[in-house]
Amino acid sequence: MTTPHPVPSAVPYAVVPYAPGAGPSAWPDELRRIARPEVLERWGAVDRTPHAPRLVAAPGGGGWAAAALVTARPGTAYAKIVDAVGDVPAAARAVVAYAEEQRLVQVVWEGWTVSGEDAAAAGFAPLRPPLPGGTDEPAGPRTGYVRWTAGEGVAEPAYYRQSTHFSCGAVTALLAQVRAGVVRPESLDREAELTLWRDATNFPACEPVGLGVAVRRRWPSSSVEVFLDTEEPVLLDHLDGDEREWRAVLQRASRADADRLGVPVHGLRLSLAELREAVEAPGRCRHVLLLVSLATMQGFDVPHWVLCHGTVPGAVVVEDPWFNTGAGETWVDAHLLPVADASLDAMSLLGGEVRVRGAVLIDGG
């Protein structure tokens, strides 16, 4: 059961664009009065411009009583509190009011400075720490918090960050099986990630049929279906000549393997309504691995696999196994990520003049 968006609260707040590139002199005096220098230094250490950084401030005492640095990926339905300074509870109330006014379904909070007690008092629940990954790149704060502003939220899966630029398909399949209880969380590591990628890859990407076949081979008891509204090879637009042809041969072999293993390959486009119905099915543990372009969320048109595992009003909740530290992202941005329905519908159509959608449905029973 879901609940409608709440009526926006009467909590006062102000929104101010944040431009750290202009230097400390450009920051509002009210912010410099309530924020420690080391916090402002960390805020400005990366270019957060792609995520529209803004300050949400709570008035008080003739100026600002509190402020929060807020960002979010484009095309999504959440707001992220990077930090709150000053009267932290007042800052949290202001951001929640702002999120409700913008009809966002979720607010997350990076645990750089906030305590678990303060987050809980503001109505935020702790997120599960991410599973250990196979990359040495910093993953962000050790803790994070979430508050849903619409619906009842969704059950939280484990989060794991892919260790390469090309193993997203394997990681989403493994995360689905962890959530279904087929794979133990502690066994999801770099070896498991790369082993499944090796079985599924079209070098280096994982195309939908090959990924579905690899999942069936690895877990024969799991029901697997592939939805791909073309019979032509996919994810090869950037290649030509022999580099394209030998990968097309492998894709044809994957289709033959699917037929032999009994993996249905539907030559149909999975609609957003059908996707929502699949992951909402009561009493079932169904997941959709969905191919999307990162053009909207990250600014570059690269195909990428995400795991769709829940829904809230107006958005599908996904796990994205990759995040962009260069834009100030952490695992808190990529975990329990609500993507607006219209945005997900658009970003999951890939290709040139002929747009196609690729998806793998896994039913864990």
Image: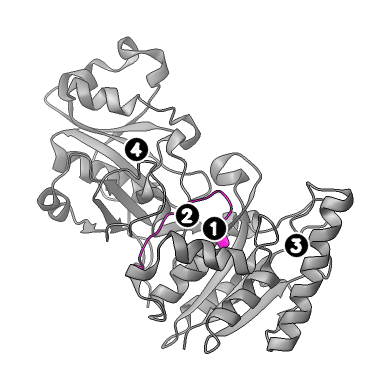
Does residue 160 belong to the magenta stretch?
yes
Q: CA distance from mark 3 to mark 1?
A: 19 Å
Magenta stretch bounds? 155-169
The residue positioned 35% from the left and 75% from the top of the image is 184
Residue 203: x %, y % from top left: 69, 57
The residue positioned 81% from the left and 71% from the top of the image is 252
Answer yes or no: do the residues labelled 2 and 3 have beta carbons within 8 Å? no
Residue 94: x %, y % from top left: 25, 41
Q: CA distance from mark 4 to mark 1?
A: 27 Å
Q: Nearer the viewer, mark 2 or mark 4?
A: 2
Foreground residue among 287 and 61? 287
Question: How does the figure colour the protein chain or chains?
Answer: one colour
Q: Nearer the viewer, mark 4 or mark 1?
A: 1
Give the crowd class for mark 2: few <14, some 14-19, many >=20 residues within 10 Å.
many
* Residue at the spot of label 4: 70
Answer yes or no: do the residues labelled 4 and 3 have beta carbons within 8 Å? no
Q: Which of the two labelled residues, at mark 4 and mark 3, occupies the earlier sequence position?
A: 4
Q: Secondary structure at mark 4?
A: strand
Left or right for 245, reference 170: right
Answer yes or no: do the residues labelled 1 and 2 have beta carbons within 8 Å? yes
